[in-house]
Image (cartoon, grey):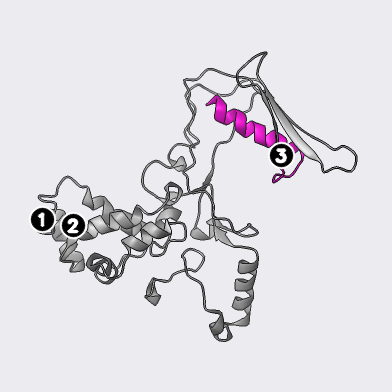
Amino acid sequence: PKERHLRRNMFLQGWSAKKRAAKDIPAELRGMMAVAEKYHLQANALAPSRNILRAMPMWDHVRANKSALRQACNSSIQTVQCLKANHGLLTVGEFADLAELWSDGAHESLDDLCECGICKAVRDASGCVCPMSCMSRANRIINALPARWDPRGVLPEDYEDNVSEVGPVEGDKMEFDRRVTTRGTISNVLRIFTDGTPPCGDRMDVSVNETASELVVATMGSVWQEGNSEPAAGAGIFVSNDHPLNRSIRLPASLNPTGLSGGLAVTLLAALNAD
């Protein structure tokens, strides 16, 4: 964003510090920024908690669809200026709260002349003269977020701690820990030593279909090397003779060729196909 007060964090938003101004930055901070740039510090997590998602800055959100966000936040649009100047919106949570009012059934009309209690409260609190338009604009802006970074809807944290209805695990069986939510503060979703590739924006689904029958699956990864050739890794899945889930795979060269890599790959493959 052009407005400096809307620039909260260069790692959470799509802007960067001007290098020509580096002389005005303390040496220790310059060193930290250099390390962050060299090792591709970025915001990334399998499932950020709702509190973290809501605390993220919305303006120029680093994980938003750039084209959609740019169009929705065009500074020449009156409602965009109103959201900045009158409503004072900064975080994703603030946008989500205003956007939620847009779909409330209490509205008497769907234009800015609505005299319902919600629109009156918005006018009184912010001095906004176009409450319905601002609610709609806030909704459009937050819709630029990919599902993983959108606090609305059902998140893994809403169900991953639920106790299984089928009873405790018996014998030598072990229940898989499906918890993937990153909790705490925004700093907990910052990752360093990445390759700089933008992370996946899809929302994790770790829900369990407890009505499904039990299925025993055997997986194994292995690695082999002939002469001076590069090592290669593969893995297999076995359920029973002629079972449709049985398969063998060869790991792509982009993955580290180890038996562990192969085992992890087919475990994921088995889980996806057995669902």
Mark 1 vs mark 3, CA separation in Å: 59 Å
The stretch drawn in magenta includes residue 154: no
Please report the residue visible at 46 percent of the width from the left and 65 percent of the height from the top.
Answer: 13
Q: In what element is the residue under mark 1? A: loop
Q: Which of 211 and 20 is in front in this view?
A: 20
Residue named by callout 2: 132
Q: Which of marks 3 and 2 is nearer the N terminus?
A: 2
Q: What residue is pinned by disc 1?
A: 114
Q: What stretch is highlighted in magenta?
A: 252-275
Query: Would you identify the image quadrant in which residue 8 lies?
Result: bottom left
Residue at disc 2, secondary structure = helix
Residue 138 lies, with reference to residue 225, above or below; the image says: below
Q: Earlier in the sequence, mark 2 or mark 1?
A: 1
Q: Position of residue 245 (x, y in %)?
A: 61, 22
Decide: marks 1, 3 in contact (CB < 8 A)? no
Q: Which amino acid does label 1 sit on?
A: Cys
Label 2, label 1: how far apart the Cα atoms are: 8 Å
Q: Where in the figure is residue 96, as x and y percent of width and height?
A: 32, 54
Disc 3 marks a residue whose amino acid type is Ser
Residue furthest to the top: 241
Residue contact at pointers 2 and 1, CB within 8 angstroms: yes
Image position, residue 106 (x, y; %): 14, 47
Say if mark 3 contacts mark 2, CB within 8 Å.
Answer: no
In the rendered view, would you say 275 is above or below 110?
Answer: above
Quadrant assignment for the N terminus:
bottom left
Q: Name the residue under label 3.
A: 261
Instruction: State yes or no: residue 256 in magenta.
Output: yes
Q: Residue 104 carries which label?
A: none
Give the SS element for disc 3: helix
**Mark 1, other Cα within 10 Å: few <14 / some 14–19 / many ≥20:** some
